[in-house]
Image (cartoon, rainbow, N blue to C red):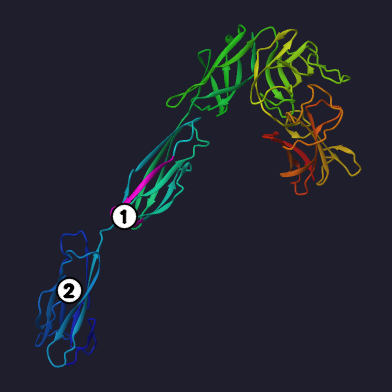
Protein backbone atom coordinates (compact mmCIF):
# COMPACT_ATOMS: atom_id res chain seq x y z
CA UNK A 1 0.00 0.00 0.00
CA UNK A 2 1.57 3.23 -1.19
CA UNK A 3 -0.83 6.11 -0.54
CA UNK A 4 0.24 9.43 -2.04
CA UNK A 5 -1.35 12.67 -0.83
CA UNK A 6 -0.18 16.26 -1.51
CA UNK A 7 -2.15 19.07 0.13
CA UNK A 8 -4.95 16.66 0.70
CA UNK A 9 -5.20 15.66 -2.93
CA UNK A 10 -4.96 11.84 -3.16
CA UNK A 11 -3.93 10.18 -6.44
CA UNK A 12 -6.15 7.74 -8.20
CA UNK A 13 -3.98 4.78 -7.02
CA UNK A 14 -4.41 5.67 -3.36
CA UNK A 15 -6.70 3.48 -1.32
CA UNK A 16 -7.81 6.55 0.67
CA UNK A 17 -10.51 9.09 -0.03
CA UNK A 18 -10.48 12.52 1.78
CA UNK A 19 -13.51 14.84 1.91
CA UNK A 20 -13.23 17.79 1.88
CA UNK A 21 -9.66 18.27 0.75
CA UNK A 22 -9.40 21.69 2.49
CA UNK A 23 -11.17 23.61 5.22
CA UNK A 24 -11.81 27.34 5.67
CA UNK A 25 -13.15 29.27 8.66
CA UNK A 26 -14.21 32.93 8.73
CA UNK A 27 -14.80 34.99 11.86
CA UNK A 28 -15.52 38.68 12.51
CA UNK A 29 -13.18 40.26 15.02
CA UNK A 30 -16.14 41.54 17.02
CA UNK A 31 -18.03 38.21 17.13
CA UNK A 32 -18.49 36.48 20.49
CA UNK A 33 -19.74 33.09 19.24
CA UNK A 34 -17.11 30.73 17.84
CA UNK A 35 -17.35 29.38 14.30
CA UNK A 36 -19.08 26.01 13.97
CA UNK A 37 -16.65 23.03 13.79
CA UNK A 38 -16.03 21.41 10.43
CA UNK A 39 -15.54 17.70 9.72
CA UNK A 40 -13.01 15.85 7.53
CA UNK A 41 -13.83 12.27 6.58
CA UNK A 42 -11.11 9.79 5.55
CA UNK A 43 -12.20 6.44 4.17
CA UNK A 44 -11.11 3.68 1.85
CA UNK A 45 -11.76 4.17 -1.80
CA UNK A 46 -14.20 1.27 -1.72
CA UNK A 47 -16.01 2.63 1.23
CA UNK A 48 -15.60 -0.59 3.16
CA UNK A 49 -14.85 -0.63 6.83
CA UNK A 50 -11.26 -1.57 7.43
CA UNK A 51 -9.93 -2.45 10.82
CA UNK A 52 -6.61 -3.17 9.18
CA UNK A 53 -6.16 0.41 8.03
CA UNK A 54 -5.55 2.85 10.87
CA UNK A 55 -4.29 6.44 10.91
CA UNK A 56 -2.63 8.82 13.34
CA UNK A 57 -3.59 12.50 13.50
CA UNK A 58 -0.78 14.92 14.36
CA UNK A 59 -1.75 17.57 16.90
CA UNK A 60 -1.97 21.03 15.26
CA UNK A 61 0.95 23.33 15.81
CA UNK A 62 -1.31 26.43 16.09
CA UNK A 63 -3.20 26.71 19.34
CA UNK A 64 -6.24 28.27 17.61
CA UNK A 65 -6.93 24.91 15.91
CA UNK A 66 -8.05 21.76 17.74
CA UNK A 67 -9.03 18.30 16.47
CA UNK A 68 -11.52 15.83 17.93
CA UNK A 69 -9.46 12.60 17.61
CA UNK A 70 -5.77 11.79 17.27
CA UNK A 71 -6.08 8.22 15.83
CA UNK A 72 -8.56 5.67 14.59
CA UNK A 73 -9.57 3.07 12.05
CA UNK A 74 -11.04 3.87 8.66
CA UNK A 75 -13.47 5.28 7.96
CA UNK A 76 -12.76 8.08 10.41
CA UNK A 77 -14.41 11.48 10.93
CA UNK A 78 -12.25 14.21 12.41
CA UNK A 79 -13.86 17.39 13.73
CA UNK A 80 -11.81 20.58 13.57
CA UNK A 81 -12.64 23.59 15.71
CA UNK A 82 -11.08 27.05 15.77
CA UNK A 83 -10.92 29.69 18.49
CA UNK A 84 -9.98 33.13 17.04
CA UNK A 85 -10.20 34.80 20.43
CA UNK A 86 -7.45 37.47 20.79
CA UNK A 87 -6.26 36.95 17.23
CA UNK A 88 -5.81 40.20 15.32
CA UNK A 89 -7.40 40.76 11.95
CA UNK A 90 -5.63 38.67 9.32
CA UNK A 91 -5.38 35.30 7.56
CA UNK A 92 -4.01 32.24 9.39
CA UNK A 93 -3.07 28.90 7.82
CA UNK A 94 -2.45 25.44 9.27
CA UNK A 95 -2.30 21.88 7.94
CA UNK A 96 -3.99 18.82 9.38
CA UNK A 97 -1.50 15.97 9.13
CA UNK A 98 -3.04 12.47 8.96
CA UNK A 99 -0.50 9.62 8.71
CA UNK A 100 -1.47 6.05 7.76
CA UNK A 101 0.02 3.44 10.04
CA UNK A 102 2.22 0.84 8.42
CA UNK A 103 5.37 0.51 6.36
CA UNK A 104 6.56 3.60 4.45
CA UNK A 105 3.57 5.78 5.31
CA UNK A 106 2.86 8.87 3.15
CA UNK A 107 1.06 11.59 5.21
CA UNK A 108 -2.16 13.12 4.05
CA UNK A 109 -1.99 16.97 4.38
CA UNK A 110 -5.26 18.91 4.60
CA UNK A 111 -4.99 22.79 4.44
CA UNK A 112 -6.91 24.71 7.06
CA UNK A 113 -7.44 28.50 6.73
CA UNK A 114 -8.82 30.93 9.30
CA UNK A 115 -9.74 34.48 8.28
CA UNK A 116 -10.30 37.00 11.05
CA UNK A 117 -12.06 40.02 9.49
CA UNK A 118 -13.14 43.45 10.55
CA UNK A 119 -16.91 43.84 10.51
CA UNK A 120 -18.24 45.54 7.34
CA UNK A 121 -18.07 49.34 7.52
CA UNK A 122 -21.06 51.59 7.08
CA UNK A 123 -21.35 55.23 6.12
CA UNK A 124 -22.41 57.72 8.75
CA UNK A 125 -24.04 60.94 7.50
CA UNK A 126 -24.31 63.98 9.75
CA UNK A 127 -27.67 64.94 8.25
CA UNK A 128 -30.13 63.43 5.82
CA UNK A 129 -31.61 66.74 4.68
CA UNK A 130 -30.56 70.33 3.99
CA UNK A 131 -32.64 73.48 3.56
CA UNK A 132 -31.70 76.73 1.82
CA UNK A 133 -33.73 79.94 1.87
CA UNK A 134 -33.18 82.85 -0.51
CA UNK A 135 -35.00 86.15 -0.59
CA UNK A 136 -34.83 87.74 -4.04
CA UNK A 137 -32.72 90.85 -3.99
CA UNK A 138 -30.58 89.67 -1.08
CA UNK A 139 -27.09 88.23 -1.32
CA UNK A 140 -26.87 84.61 -2.43
CA UNK A 141 -27.38 82.04 0.36
CA UNK A 142 -24.22 80.70 1.94
CA UNK A 143 -23.09 77.21 1.02
CA UNK A 144 -23.52 74.28 3.40
CA UNK A 145 -21.74 70.97 3.83
CA UNK A 146 -22.44 67.37 4.78
CA UNK A 147 -19.88 65.40 6.80
CA UNK A 148 -19.37 61.67 6.22
CA UNK A 149 -17.83 59.17 8.61
CA UNK A 150 -17.21 55.42 8.71
CA UNK A 151 -18.15 52.87 11.37
CA UNK A 152 -15.10 50.78 10.62
CA UNK A 153 -12.57 50.64 7.84
CA UNK A 154 -11.83 52.99 4.94
CA UNK A 155 -14.71 53.77 2.59
CA UNK A 156 -14.90 55.54 -0.74
CA UNK A 157 -17.96 57.54 -1.78
CA UNK A 158 -19.37 59.26 -4.85
CA UNK A 159 -22.29 61.64 -5.23
CA UNK A 160 -24.71 62.69 -7.97
CA UNK A 161 -27.56 65.23 -8.12
CA UNK A 162 -31.06 64.18 -9.10
CA UNK A 163 -33.72 66.53 -10.45
CA UNK A 164 -32.26 69.85 -9.36
CA UNK A 165 -30.24 71.91 -11.87
CA UNK A 166 -30.00 74.65 -9.24
CA UNK A 167 -28.11 72.34 -6.85
CA UNK A 168 -24.30 72.40 -7.00
CA UNK A 169 -22.02 69.65 -5.66
CA UNK A 170 -18.50 70.64 -6.79
CA UNK A 171 -16.80 67.70 -5.00
CA UNK A 172 -18.46 64.52 -6.23
CA UNK A 173 -16.25 61.81 -4.68
CA UNK A 174 -13.93 61.18 -1.78
CA UNK A 175 -12.41 58.74 0.71
CA UNK A 176 -13.23 58.40 4.41
CA UNK A 177 -10.46 57.17 6.71
CA UNK A 178 -11.33 55.59 10.05
CA UNK A 179 -11.75 58.16 12.84
CA UNK A 180 -11.80 61.00 10.28
CA UNK A 181 -14.55 62.72 8.31
CA UNK A 182 -14.96 63.56 4.65
CA UNK A 183 -16.78 66.79 3.73
CA UNK A 184 -19.06 67.34 0.74
CA UNK A 185 -19.71 71.08 0.09
CA UNK A 186 -23.11 72.02 -1.32
CA UNK A 187 -24.35 75.32 -2.78
CA UNK A 188 -27.33 76.56 -4.80
CA UNK A 189 -27.73 78.81 -7.84
CA UNK A 190 -30.76 81.07 -7.61
CA UNK A 191 -30.59 82.72 -11.05
CA UNK A 192 -33.88 82.77 -12.98
CA UNK A 193 -35.83 81.11 -10.16
CA UNK A 194 -39.23 82.50 -9.23
CA UNK A 195 -40.73 82.29 -5.74
CA UNK A 196 -41.62 78.80 -4.64
CA UNK A 197 -40.23 75.67 -3.01
CA UNK A 198 -37.79 73.59 -5.02
CA UNK A 199 -36.81 70.04 -4.07
CA UNK A 200 -33.83 67.99 -5.11
CA UNK A 201 -31.81 65.01 -3.95
CA UNK A 202 -28.15 64.06 -3.67
CA UNK A 203 -27.49 60.34 -4.10
CA UNK A 204 -24.41 59.13 -2.20
CA UNK A 205 -22.98 55.78 -3.29
CA UNK A 206 -20.72 53.66 -1.03
CA UNK A 207 -20.37 50.26 -2.78
CA UNK A 208 -18.16 48.76 -0.04
CA UNK A 209 -20.42 49.75 2.85
CA UNK A 210 -23.28 47.84 4.42
CA UNK A 211 -25.68 50.47 3.07
CA UNK A 212 -24.85 50.97 -0.61
CA UNK A 213 -26.90 54.10 -1.26
CA UNK A 214 -27.93 57.10 0.81
CA UNK A 215 -30.16 60.00 -0.22
CA UNK A 216 -29.80 63.54 1.09
CA UNK A 217 -32.92 65.62 0.50
CA UNK A 218 -32.30 69.30 -0.35
CA UNK A 219 -34.99 71.98 -0.26
CA UNK A 220 -34.62 75.51 -1.65
CA UNK A 221 -37.21 78.09 -0.71
CA UNK A 222 -37.29 81.19 -2.90
CA UNK A 223 -38.99 84.16 -1.28
CA UNK A 224 -40.28 87.01 -3.48
CA UNK A 225 -38.41 89.88 -1.83
CA UNK A 226 -39.53 93.48 -1.96
CA UNK A 227 -40.66 94.71 -5.40
CA UNK A 228 -39.55 98.03 -6.79
CA UNK A 229 -41.19 100.40 -9.26
CA UNK A 230 -38.65 102.06 -11.57
CA UNK A 231 -40.83 103.85 -14.12
CA UNK A 232 -44.28 104.02 -15.67
CA UNK A 233 -45.71 104.62 -19.10
CA UNK A 234 -47.20 107.14 -19.42
CA UNK A 235 -45.04 108.92 -16.89
CA UNK A 236 -47.72 111.52 -16.25
CA UNK A 237 -51.49 111.64 -16.61
CA UNK A 238 -53.66 114.63 -17.51
CA UNK A 239 -56.53 115.62 -15.27
CA UNK A 240 -59.87 114.48 -16.59
CA UNK A 241 -58.42 111.38 -18.23
CA UNK A 242 -60.65 108.34 -18.44
CA UNK A 243 -59.90 104.85 -17.18
CA UNK A 244 -56.56 103.71 -18.51
CA UNK A 245 -53.96 100.94 -18.48
CA UNK A 246 -50.59 101.97 -17.07
CA UNK A 247 -47.39 100.08 -17.82
CA UNK A 248 -45.24 99.67 -14.72
CA UNK A 249 -41.56 98.81 -15.05
CA UNK A 250 -39.59 97.53 -12.08
CA UNK A 251 -38.14 94.47 -10.41
CA UNK A 252 -39.39 91.38 -8.60
CA UNK A 253 -42.89 91.22 -10.05
CA UNK A 254 -44.55 87.78 -9.83
CA UNK A 255 -47.97 86.19 -10.18
CA UNK A 256 -48.80 86.97 -6.53
CA UNK A 257 -47.69 90.61 -6.69
CA UNK A 258 -50.50 93.00 -5.80
CA UNK A 259 -50.64 96.62 -7.01
CA UNK A 260 -52.50 99.43 -5.28
CA UNK A 261 -53.20 103.07 -6.09
CA UNK A 262 -53.74 105.49 -3.20
CA UNK A 263 -54.12 102.48 -0.90
CA UNK A 264 -56.74 100.60 -2.96
CA UNK A 265 -55.89 97.40 -4.81
CA UNK A 266 -56.18 97.64 -8.60
CA UNK A 267 -56.39 95.03 -11.33
CA UNK A 268 -53.02 94.01 -12.76
CA UNK A 269 -51.50 91.81 -15.43
CA UNK A 270 -47.98 90.57 -14.73
CA UNK A 271 -46.04 90.54 -18.00
CA UNK A 272 -42.77 89.36 -16.46
CA UNK A 273 -40.53 89.88 -13.46
CA UNK A 274 -39.78 93.43 -14.62
CA UNK A 275 -43.05 94.64 -16.16
CA UNK A 276 -46.77 94.72 -15.50
CA UNK A 277 -49.83 96.64 -16.58
CA UNK A 278 -52.32 97.99 -14.06
CA UNK A 279 -55.82 99.33 -14.58
CA UNK A 280 -56.43 102.78 -13.10
CA UNK A 281 -59.95 104.24 -12.86
CA UNK A 282 -60.72 107.78 -13.96
CA UNK A 283 -61.62 108.77 -10.39
CA UNK A 284 -57.89 108.98 -9.65
CA UNK A 285 -57.44 111.81 -12.20
CA UNK A 286 -60.15 114.26 -11.19
CA UNK A 287 -57.67 116.78 -9.77
CA UNK A 288 -54.01 117.56 -10.30
CA UNK A 289 -51.43 116.12 -7.94
CA UNK A 290 -50.01 112.65 -7.60
CA UNK A 291 -51.26 109.07 -7.34
CA UNK A 292 -49.27 106.87 -4.96
CA UNK A 293 -48.56 103.46 -6.50
CA UNK A 294 -47.38 100.46 -4.49
CA UNK A 295 -46.34 96.97 -5.54
CA UNK A 296 -46.56 94.37 -2.77
CA UNK A 297 -45.27 90.80 -2.52
CA UNK A 298 -46.67 88.35 0.06
CA UNK A 299 -44.80 87.06 3.09
CA UNK A 300 -42.69 85.25 4.00
CA UNK A 301 -39.95 87.30 2.43
CA UNK A 302 -42.16 89.87 0.74
CA UNK A 303 -43.04 93.47 1.45
CA UNK A 304 -44.13 96.77 -0.08
CA UNK A 305 -42.19 98.73 -2.65
CA UNK A 306 -41.27 102.34 -1.94
CA UNK A 307 -44.19 104.53 -3.09
CA UNK A 308 -44.06 105.65 -6.71
CA UNK A 309 -45.75 108.99 -7.28
CA UNK A 310 -47.54 109.18 -10.62
CA UNK A 311 -48.05 112.80 -11.61
CA UNK A 312 -51.51 114.10 -12.54
CA UNK A 313 -51.16 117.46 -14.32
CA UNK A 314 -53.79 119.94 -15.52
CA UNK A 315 -53.69 122.83 -18.00
CA UNK A 316 -50.04 122.39 -18.86
CA UNK A 317 -47.46 120.13 -20.42
CA UNK A 318 -47.69 116.42 -19.61
CA UNK A 319 -44.62 114.27 -20.31
CA UNK A 320 -45.52 110.67 -21.15
CA UNK A 321 -42.05 109.40 -22.08
CA UNK A 322 -38.43 110.47 -22.57
CA UNK A 323 -36.62 108.36 -25.19
CA UNK A 324 -33.21 108.18 -26.82
CA UNK A 325 -34.03 109.46 -30.31
CA UNK A 326 -31.94 106.71 -31.95
CA UNK A 327 -32.56 103.52 -29.99
CA UNK A 328 -35.85 104.48 -28.31
CA UNK A 329 -34.67 103.33 -24.89
CA UNK A 330 -36.72 104.97 -22.15
CA UNK A 331 -35.59 107.05 -19.18
CA UNK A 332 -31.84 106.57 -19.76
CA UNK A 333 -29.73 109.36 -21.25
CA UNK A 334 -26.11 110.43 -21.58
CA UNK A 335 -24.70 113.96 -21.92
CA UNK A 336 -25.00 115.23 -25.50
CA UNK A 337 -27.65 112.67 -26.47
CA UNK A 338 -30.49 113.54 -28.84
CA UNK A 339 -33.72 112.76 -26.98
CA UNK A 340 -37.41 112.81 -27.86
CA UNK A 341 -40.23 113.76 -25.47
CA UNK A 342 -43.74 112.42 -26.02
CA UNK A 343 -46.79 113.76 -24.25
CA UNK A 344 -49.55 116.35 -24.31
CA UNK A 345 -49.41 120.15 -24.37
CA UNK A 346 -45.63 120.16 -24.82
CA UNK A 347 -45.58 122.90 -27.45
CA UNK A 348 -47.49 124.67 -30.20
CA UNK A 349 -50.17 122.83 -32.23
CA UNK A 350 -47.99 122.86 -35.35
CA UNK A 351 -44.46 121.51 -35.63
CA UNK A 352 -41.77 124.17 -35.29
CA UNK A 353 -38.07 123.48 -35.97
CA UNK A 354 -34.96 125.43 -35.01
CA UNK A 355 -33.42 128.04 -37.32
CA UNK A 356 -30.70 126.10 -39.15
CA UNK A 357 -29.06 129.31 -40.40
CA UNK A 358 -27.73 129.98 -36.92
CA UNK A 359 -24.49 128.44 -35.56
CA UNK A 360 -26.11 127.65 -32.24
CA UNK A 361 -29.39 125.94 -31.47
CA UNK A 362 -31.34 127.92 -28.90
CA UNK A 363 -32.83 126.69 -25.65
CA UNK A 364 -36.22 128.27 -26.29
CA UNK A 365 -38.35 127.50 -29.34
CA UNK A 366 -41.96 128.59 -29.85
CA UNK A 367 -42.39 129.16 -26.08
CA UNK A 368 -41.07 125.63 -25.33
CA UNK A 369 -38.19 124.91 -23.00
CA UNK A 370 -36.68 121.65 -21.70
CA UNK A 371 -34.89 121.65 -18.34
CA UNK A 372 -32.52 118.91 -17.13
CA UNK A 373 -31.93 119.59 -13.42
CA UNK A 374 -32.81 123.24 -14.25
CA UNK A 375 -30.17 123.28 -17.06
CA UNK A 376 -31.86 124.48 -20.27
CA UNK A 377 -31.43 122.14 -23.22
CA UNK A 378 -31.11 123.03 -26.94
CA UNK A 379 -34.48 122.49 -28.68
CA UNK A 380 -34.38 120.87 -32.15
CA UNK A 381 -38.15 120.94 -32.74
CA UNK A 382 -41.37 121.25 -30.79
CA UNK A 383 -45.06 120.43 -31.12
CA UNK A 384 -47.98 119.69 -28.86
CA UNK A 385 -47.19 115.97 -28.67
CA UNK A 386 -43.46 115.70 -29.39
CA UNK A 387 -40.30 117.67 -28.61
CA UNK A 388 -36.72 116.95 -29.71
CA UNK A 389 -33.83 118.22 -27.57
CA UNK A 390 -30.14 117.71 -26.73
CA UNK A 391 -29.10 116.59 -23.24
CA UNK A 392 -26.77 119.27 -21.79
CA UNK A 393 -23.13 118.19 -21.61
CA UNK A 394 -22.88 119.56 -18.06
CA UNK A 395 -25.48 117.14 -16.70
CA UNK A 396 -23.81 115.01 -13.99
CA UNK A 397 -23.70 111.25 -14.63
CA UNK A 398 -24.27 108.34 -12.29
CA UNK A 399 -27.55 109.54 -10.76
CA UNK A 400 -31.17 110.28 -11.52
CA UNK A 401 -31.95 113.68 -13.00
CA UNK A 402 -35.21 115.58 -12.92
CA UNK A 403 -36.51 116.65 -16.36
CA UNK A 404 -39.35 119.06 -17.11
CA UNK A 405 -40.88 120.55 -20.24
CA UNK A 406 -42.14 124.14 -20.06
CA UNK A 407 -44.66 125.61 -22.49
CA UNK A 408 -45.95 129.18 -22.27
CA UNK A 409 -44.44 129.52 -18.83
CA UNK A 410 -46.09 126.38 -17.36
CA UNK A 411 -43.87 123.52 -16.26
CA UNK A 412 -44.77 119.86 -16.50
CA UNK A 413 -44.40 117.67 -13.47
CA UNK A 414 -40.82 116.40 -13.19
CA UNK A 415 -39.82 113.10 -14.77
CA UNK A 416 -36.80 111.13 -13.52
CA UNK A 417 -34.19 109.89 -16.00
CA UNK A 418 -31.07 107.84 -15.30
CA UNK A 419 -27.95 109.65 -16.53
CA UNK A 420 -25.21 107.28 -17.75
CA UNK A 421 -21.71 108.21 -18.99
CA UNK A 422 -22.59 106.75 -22.39
CA UNK A 423 -25.74 105.45 -24.05
CA UNK A 424 -25.05 104.76 -27.73
CA UNK A 425 -27.94 104.31 -30.12
CA UNK A 426 -27.80 103.85 -33.89
CA UNK A 427 -30.30 105.74 -36.07
CA UNK A 428 -32.36 103.46 -38.31
CA UNK A 429 -34.08 104.03 -41.63
CA UNK A 430 -37.51 103.37 -40.06
CA UNK A 431 -36.88 105.95 -37.34
CA UNK A 432 -38.10 103.58 -34.61
CA UNK A 433 -34.77 102.16 -33.49
CA UNK A 434 -34.91 98.76 -35.22
CA UNK A 435 -34.25 97.28 -38.65
CA UNK A 436 -32.04 98.67 -41.39
CA UNK A 437 -29.52 101.23 -40.16
CA UNK A 438 -29.55 104.65 -41.76
CA UNK A 439 -26.20 103.81 -43.36
CA UNK A 440 -24.25 104.50 -46.54
CA UNK A 441 -21.60 102.48 -48.33
CA UNK A 442 -18.74 104.02 -50.28
CA UNK A 443 -18.06 102.47 -53.70
CA UNK A 444 -14.73 102.30 -55.53
CA UNK A 445 -15.34 105.73 -57.08
CA UNK A 446 -15.92 107.31 -53.68
CA UNK A 447 -19.67 107.67 -54.10
CA UNK A 448 -21.91 107.34 -51.02
CA UNK A 449 -24.82 104.99 -51.69
CA UNK A 450 -27.68 104.37 -49.26
CA UNK A 451 -27.36 100.80 -48.02
CA UNK A 452 -30.46 98.80 -48.98
CA UNK A 453 -31.46 95.84 -51.11
CA UNK A 454 -30.27 97.59 -54.27
CA UNK A 455 -27.00 98.77 -52.74
CA UNK A 456 -25.82 95.90 -50.58
CA UNK A 457 -22.50 96.47 -48.83
CA UNK A 458 -19.50 94.34 -49.70
CA UNK A 459 -16.76 93.12 -47.44
CA UNK A 460 -13.83 95.51 -47.44
CA UNK A 461 -16.04 98.51 -48.22
CA UNK A 462 -16.51 101.46 -45.89
CA UNK A 463 -19.91 101.82 -44.21
CA UNK A 464 -21.01 105.17 -42.75
CA UNK A 465 -23.75 105.32 -40.12
CA UNK A 466 -25.02 107.79 -37.52
CA UNK A 467 -25.55 107.52 -33.80
CA UNK A 468 -25.95 109.49 -30.59
CA UNK A 469 -25.14 108.93 -26.92
CA UNK A 470 -21.34 109.15 -27.01
CA UNK A 471 -21.26 111.14 -23.78
CA UNK A 472 -18.34 113.44 -22.97
CA UNK A 473 -15.13 112.65 -24.85
CA UNK A 474 -12.44 115.14 -23.90
CA UNK A 475 -13.49 118.80 -23.75
CA UNK A 476 -17.25 118.94 -24.30
CA UNK A 477 -18.52 121.23 -27.07
CA UNK A 478 -20.94 124.06 -26.45
CA UNK A 479 -24.49 122.80 -26.05
CA UNK A 480 -26.38 123.06 -29.33
CA UNK A 481 -23.34 124.09 -31.39
CA UNK A 482 -23.12 123.08 -35.03
CA UNK A 483 -19.98 121.14 -35.97
CA UNK A 484 -17.85 122.72 -38.72
CA UNK A 485 -14.70 120.60 -38.54
CA UNK A 486 -14.25 116.83 -38.11
CA UNK A 487 -12.74 115.29 -35.00
CA UNK A 488 -8.97 114.89 -34.85
CA UNK A 489 -9.09 111.63 -32.89
CA UNK A 490 -11.36 108.67 -32.13
CA UNK A 491 -12.82 107.93 -28.73
CA UNK A 492 -10.51 105.14 -27.43
CA UNK A 493 -13.44 103.25 -25.89
CA UNK A 494 -15.44 103.13 -29.15
CA UNK A 495 -15.71 99.87 -31.11
CA UNK A 496 -17.90 98.67 -34.00
CA UNK A 497 -19.02 95.11 -34.66
CA UNK A 498 -20.40 94.09 -38.07
CA UNK A 499 -21.67 90.61 -38.84
CA UNK A 500 -20.30 89.31 -35.56
CA UNK A 501 -16.74 90.59 -36.14
CA UNK A 502 -14.96 93.69 -34.85
CA UNK A 503 -14.49 96.23 -37.62
CA UNK A 504 -11.73 98.77 -38.17
CA UNK A 505 -13.03 102.21 -37.17
CA UNK A 506 -11.69 104.85 -39.56
CA UNK A 507 -13.55 107.86 -38.12
CA UNK A 508 -15.91 108.57 -35.24
CA UNK A 509 -16.88 112.13 -34.42
CA UNK A 510 -19.18 115.01 -35.31
CA UNK A 511 -20.53 115.26 -38.80
CA UNK A 512 -19.78 118.78 -40.19
CA UNK A 513 -23.01 120.67 -40.68
CA UNK A 514 -24.86 118.71 -37.98
CA UNK A 515 -25.22 119.45 -34.28
CA UNK A 516 -22.54 118.24 -31.87
CA UNK A 517 -23.96 115.13 -30.22
CA UNK A 518 -24.84 113.50 -33.52
CA UNK A 519 -22.03 111.03 -34.17
CA UNK A 520 -20.80 109.95 -37.61
CA UNK A 521 -18.98 106.61 -37.70
CA UNK A 522 -16.96 105.31 -40.66
CA UNK A 523 -15.95 101.65 -40.41
CA UNK A 524 -14.37 99.12 -42.75
CA UNK A 525 -16.46 95.97 -43.14
CA UNK A 526 -14.38 92.94 -42.04
CA UNK A 527 -13.69 90.22 -44.58
CA UNK A 528 -14.79 87.56 -42.07
CA UNK A 529 -18.13 89.21 -41.27
CA UNK A 530 -21.23 87.05 -41.66
CA UNK A 531 -23.15 88.06 -44.79
CA UNK A 532 -26.90 88.50 -45.10
CA UNK A 533 -29.65 90.99 -45.76
CA UNK A 534 -29.85 91.58 -42.01
CA UNK A 535 -26.24 91.42 -40.82
CA UNK A 536 -26.16 92.82 -37.26
CA UNK A 537 -24.25 95.99 -36.48
CA UNK A 538 -23.36 97.25 -32.99
CA UNK A 539 -21.68 100.34 -31.59
CA UNK A 540 -20.06 100.14 -28.17
CA UNK A 541 -18.77 103.17 -26.26
CA UNK A 542 -17.41 102.58 -22.79
CA UNK A 543 -19.86 100.38 -20.90
CA UNK A 544 -22.75 101.30 -23.21
CA UNK A 545 -23.82 99.25 -26.22
CA UNK A 546 -26.27 100.14 -28.99
CA UNK A 547 -29.62 98.44 -29.33
CA UNK A 548 -30.29 94.94 -30.68
CA UNK A 549 -32.06 94.52 -34.02
CA UNK A 550 -30.11 97.08 -36.12
CA UNK A 551 -28.78 95.63 -39.38
CA UNK A 552 -27.10 96.35 -42.70
CA UNK A 553 -27.48 94.54 -46.03
CA UNK A 554 -24.16 92.73 -46.55
CA UNK A 555 -23.15 90.52 -49.46
* Residue 241 visible in the picture: no
Q: Is residue 497 above or below residue 11?
A: above
Query: From the viewer's perspective, is 276 left or right of 480?
Result: left
Mark earlier in primary sequence (1, 2): 2
Real-space Cα distance between discs 1 and 2? 31 Å
Residue interval drawn in magenta? 143-155
Q: Which mark is residue 178?
A: 1
Give how far across and how far down residue 108 sits, in percent.
19, 83
Q: Residue, x 58% and y 9% (percent of image)?
A: 283
Give how far across and how far down residue 348 sits, in percent.
78, 11
As drawn, the residue found furthest toward the right would be 445
Q: Is residue 449 above or below residue 98?
A: above
Where disc 1 sits, the SS reads loop
Query: From the viewer's perspective, is 148 left or right of 545?
Result: left
**Among the 4 quarters of the image, the one containing residue 523:** top right
* Quadrant holding the N terminus: bottom left
Residue at numbered disc 2? 62
Q: Residue, x 59% and y 23% (percent of image)?
A: 230
Q: Is residue 516 above or below residue 240?
A: below
Magenta segment's dominant SS is: strand
Query: From the viewer's perspective, is 417 left or right of 349?
Result: left
Residue nearest the observer in this picture, 194 or 505: 505
Neighbours of disc 2 within 10 Å: few (<14), some (14-19), many (20+): few
Give how far across and how far down residue 206 sits, in percent.
36, 54
Give how far across and how far down residue 404 sits, in percent.
69, 15
Where disc 2 sits, the SS reads loop
Amino acid sequence: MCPLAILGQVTGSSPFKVSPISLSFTQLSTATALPAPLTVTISTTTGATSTANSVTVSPPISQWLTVSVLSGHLPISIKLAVNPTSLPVGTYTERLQVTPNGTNPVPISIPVTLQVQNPPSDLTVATSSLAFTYRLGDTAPAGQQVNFGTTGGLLSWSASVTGAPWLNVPLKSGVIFPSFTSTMPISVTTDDLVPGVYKGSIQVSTPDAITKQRAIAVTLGIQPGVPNVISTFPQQIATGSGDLNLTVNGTRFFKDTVFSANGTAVKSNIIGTSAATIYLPSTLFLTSGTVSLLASNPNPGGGDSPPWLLGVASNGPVVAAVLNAANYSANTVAPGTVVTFFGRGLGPPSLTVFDNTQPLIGTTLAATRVLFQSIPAPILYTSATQVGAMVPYALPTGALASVQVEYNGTLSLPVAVDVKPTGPGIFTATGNGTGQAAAFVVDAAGNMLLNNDKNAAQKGQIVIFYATGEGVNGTPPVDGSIAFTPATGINPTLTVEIGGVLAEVLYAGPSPGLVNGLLQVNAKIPGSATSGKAAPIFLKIGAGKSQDGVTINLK
